[in-house]
Image (tube, grey):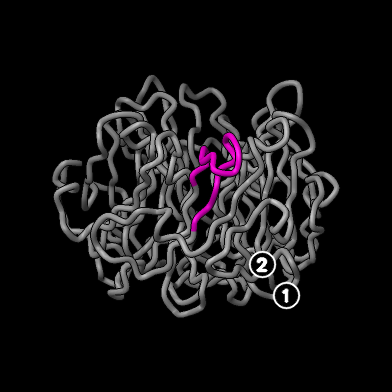
Amino acid sequence: MARTDGGTGVGADARTDGPIGPSVARDLTGDGRPDLVVASTTSIHVFAGGPGFAPADEGDATTTLSLTGAAALLTNLVALGDVTGDGVAELFVTTEAAGLIRLHRIVGPLPAGTVALLDLATSTDLSTTGVDSRVVGSLGDLTGDGRVDLAVTVGTVEGEILVFTSGAIDGPPHARIGLPTGANEPSAPSRLRDLTGDGQDDLVVGNRYRAPAGRGAVDVIPGPIAAGARTASELEAEANVVRVRTTIDTELLGSGVGLADVDHDGAVDLVVGADQASGAGVSAGHTLVLLGPLAAGTVDAASAARARIVGRPGDQVGNRIVTGFDGDGDGRADLLTIGWCGVACSGAVLGVAGLTLDRTYLPTDVTFRLDGDSGDDHFGVTASLVGDLDGDGVDDLAVGVARTNPAPGVVYLLRGGRVLPASGTAGVVADRIITGGPGFGAMVIGAD
């Protein structure tokens, strides 16, 4: 895969390093191999990876973490990695009950069978205004001490970013940074890197509904992150913040955010989606590549972009970004941008191998395009690089379809390193299809 230590990215060798060190950071079952983590609103299913990996349905999960009987519903898979540095993976998730958002830390190795999620979790209250709120997480060294920290962005009306340090992962937070009042729906890379070129991991957060007029935004807050609280207005006044903006109303810049060394110069670059951009047709969406390092101040996304990938009308490309998956078999990582609508909202995953700078990739120019099987599938509503599940030395991709009753939820697995067809549908192209109950596949998480 694309290494996640800030050194390489798209176009780098596709291999199996985790976000912080080796694949143990994705191992929740304790066998030293990465695991697949899939969730609905009522349960989390953990499938142990390894040679012969071949689950067919949710009943094949090694461990199921259940919320059955609890008042809360699972709302987000936030982060997966070895945050405390003890060689054991930790899974961070959020639940919501009566507007209260709680962050839960679940530490591996997990017991086999079905267990109550709340019995295994250490929990922290995040917000009391959290109905239907999106919460995203990123791992990186945000305090400059060489250890892994967790940044959690809570997308409520009075949203905020909370930074938890490795030494005090269960709180209280090291820092709290306010988001502007209004509709907040954040996005963030799972692994933070140095985007400003000073050798320190930076905090990167997209906000697709950021005012004015639904233009959206991406903020890059340079590390190390100072302790204490900052309001949104105080952050806006800081001179060292990189503010990626657009002048186009309702574009929803920041729908998806990724970090990778796209041009192979050793510097990390920003990949950002705007899933309502309509330059190529209504709601076609586009994905922009901005080369790092980025300097402080306001950056116009369209002017600074050195490459652009556009979708078909209605695709909503740029809703999610995945870096590190090799989908053309050349041993190097490709850039994936996901349109969660596509044809009849079946969803689509577009991949570009060997991305060329100063080029606009039209829908016919991408290396491969995979569409969902049926209308309203929203193939790609969640997608993640999930590690080398089958033991062949190359990281694999999991893509979710959160169908509801009576249709089953589905996760499609695509094996890294194979040559995907230029076009096809998920059910035909996928190497493995895992089915579950209603909502299964609404969330998957890896460590790309």
Write down the region rendered in magenta: 274-288
State the residue position of label 2. 353
Residue lying farthest to the bottom in this orientation = 265
Q: Is residue 281 magenta?
A: yes
Residue sitting nearer the eye, 122 or 183: 183
Q: Is residue 239 above or below residue 380?
A: below
Other residues around mark 1 within 10 Å, as few (<14) / some (14–19) / many (≥20): some
Q: Which mark, by number, is residue 330?
A: 1
Q: Is residue 158 above or below residue 326?
A: above
Q: Position of residue 140 (x, y in %)?
A: 37, 63
Q: Position of residue 371 (x, y in %)?
A: 75, 43
Q: The residue tagged with tag 2: helix, strand or loop?
A: loop
Q: Which mark, by number, is residue 38?
A: none
Left or right: residue 421 versus residue 68 is right
Residue lying farthest to the right in this orientation = 428
The answer to which of marks 1 and 2 sits earlier in the sequence is 1
Residue at image location 32% in from the left, 62% down from the top: 202
Do the CB atoms of the residues marked 1 and 2 lie less than 8 Å apart? yes
Q: Quadrant of the C terminus?
A: bottom right
Q: Amino acid at mark 2?
A: Ala
Q: The residue tagged with tag 1: helix, strand or loop?
A: loop
Left or right: residue 355 versus residue 88 is right
Q: Amino acid at mark 1?
A: Asp
Q: CA distance from mark 1 to mark 2?
A: 9 Å
Is there any visible trace of residue 35 in the rendered image? yes
